[in-house]
Image: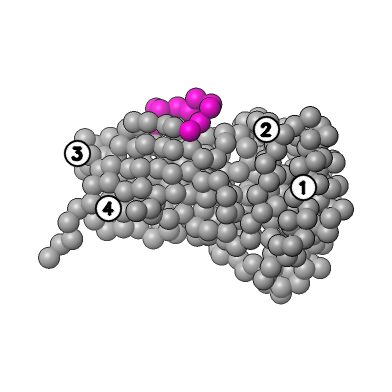
Amino acid sequence: MNAPVKHAARAFAPASVGNAIAGFDLLGHSIHGPRDTVTVRRIDSPEVRIDAIRGCATGLPTDPQHNTAGAALMALRRALDLDFGFAVELDKGIPFGSGMGGSAASCVAALVAANELLDHPLTRHQLYPLALAGEAASSGGLHGDNLGPMLLGGLCLSLLDRLVELPVPEGLTAVLVHPEHEIETRHARSVLNRGFALPDVVCQSGHLALLMAGLYQGDFGLVAAGLDDVLVMPRRACLIPGFDDVRSAALGHNALGAGISGAGPSMVAWFQNREQAELAAAPMQQAFAGAGVDSRAFVSSVAGPAAGVLP
């Protein structure tokens, strides 16, 4: 006997740290803290409709082609040739332009909710290319560094054709500080348009290799050696008020490394344990205050949560 068709589902997706400092467009991890919640209803009409967007001071598009949640569900309908559609309501908990994966979270939460309404649900890995299509509606490009950790939880390597879950050494903790400042992702990407010198690319590749080796070996010394960005961070630093002081505050309080979360303006630092992280959070906020910017701090294990279905 077939299970009855479910007609509505609600899901959340957590905030995330894109790039994980050394892995531009490739690495990311989820965090405990802000999250987006999306309600999806199965409708007879073969379309995707955005019925409501709540909790967002910045106007987001309700045209599904230009909304990450809508674009992802349109990709889902095409991929599975569905004869029914979806009506979507978004409750935003992640600020727009914060560098915390807000556009990705709406997209992932919508897919996880809609997946509950399918006769034959997909795996999280199968949802990933659909999430990539949704995220492209906001950022203009295909990159999954926020999507992978939201779908699977924790720290992920997100390539265009696969997701790889990465080990997180015991105790590894992140501090994410979000200033009351906004950077649109497309603008943050525009400062990267000119090329990079080959020696810098080689240096950055070395950092990424050291970081990966440190994660697999549980060696915090290698992790610290790899947590640097000589390509993207120097070009984006000028977009963030107080950048140098915030980074110095983190490093001066035993951070393994510190840099920009996603496209910014949020900044992130990694620590060997939660105690060190909690001690560093206030000095990082004080550094933002010195630049005239209020902020909020979130302390979370790097092994953060995955998106999930809500009751």
- Which residue shows up at 65% across the image and 31% down it? 182
Q: Is residue 21 visible?
A: no
Residue at mark 4: 118
Three-letter amino acid code at the position of disc 3: Asp
Three-letter amino acid code at the position of disc 4: Leu
- Which residue shows up at 21% across the image and 43% down it? 83
Q: Are marks 1 and 4 in contact (CB under 8 Å)?
A: no
- Distance (Cα) linking label 1 and label 3: 51 Å
Q: Nearer the viewer, residue 20 or 133?
A: 20
- Distance (Cα) linking label 2 and label 1: 16 Å
Three-letter amino acid code at the position of disc 1: Ala
Q: Nearer the viewer, residue 222 or 246?
A: 246
Q: Position of residue 61 (x, y in %)?
A: 45, 27
Quarter of the figure with residue 216: bottom right
Q: Tell me if mark 2 has few (under 14), some (14-19) or many (20+) residues whose alpha carbon lies within 10 angstroms of its own.
A: some
* Circle 3: element type: loop
* Circle 4: element type: loop
**What residue span does the magenta drawing correspond to?**
55-65
Q: Earlier in the sequence, mark 1 or mark 3?
A: 3
Three-letter amino acid code at the position of disc 2: Glu
Residue 282's label in the rendered image is 1
Q: Position of residue 68 (x, y in %)?
A: 46, 37
Mark 3 or 2, closer to the camera:
2
Q: Earlier in the sequence, mark 3 or mark 4?
A: 3
The vertical placement of 210 against 250, above or below, is below
Would you say residue 64 sits in the magenta stretch?
yes
Residue 161's label in the rendered image is none
